[in-house]
Image (cartoon, rainbow, N blue to C red):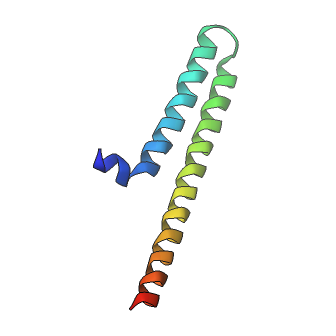
Amino acid sequence: MRAIARNWEQVTTGVLFLISVYGAVYLVRIGALGWAGMALCCAIGFFQALESFAFAADWRERVRRKQQGDAHLDG
């Protein structure tokens, strides 16, 4: 559980991508989408996951800088 908390951006990225792929395959199976639609849904899921990964990396960097700044003020 501690590893998941430490690497939450990888977990979020993987979950978003898997949900997108599962949803796309389901829509193809019920006939609502063709193969091109499935590819589009997978691509959208991939870019959503990539965006969340980039946001998480930026957020982690901002937190690290803030903590360093607070430590500098305390020391």
The N terminus appears in which quarter of the rendering? top left
Question: Observer-nearest residue: 32 or 60?
Answer: 60
In the image, residue 48 sits, relative to residue 19, either above or below, namely below
As drawn, is 22 to the left or to the right of 36? Answer: left
In the image, residue 68 sits, relative to residue 55, either above or below, namely below
Question: Observer-nearest residue: 67 or 55?
Answer: 67
Q: Residue furthest bottom?
A: 75
Residue 39 % position (x, y): 63, 29
- Residue at 46 percent of width and 89 percent of height: 73
As drawn, is 33 to the left or to the right of 68? Answer: right
- Residue at 53 percent of width and 29 percent of height: 19
In the image, residue 13 sits, relative to residue 62, either above or below, namely above
- Residue at 55 percent of width and 64 percent of height: 58
In the image, residue 24 sits, relative to residue 52, either above or below, namely above
Q: Quadrant of residue 46?
A: top right
- Residue at 62 percent of width and 37 percent of height: 43
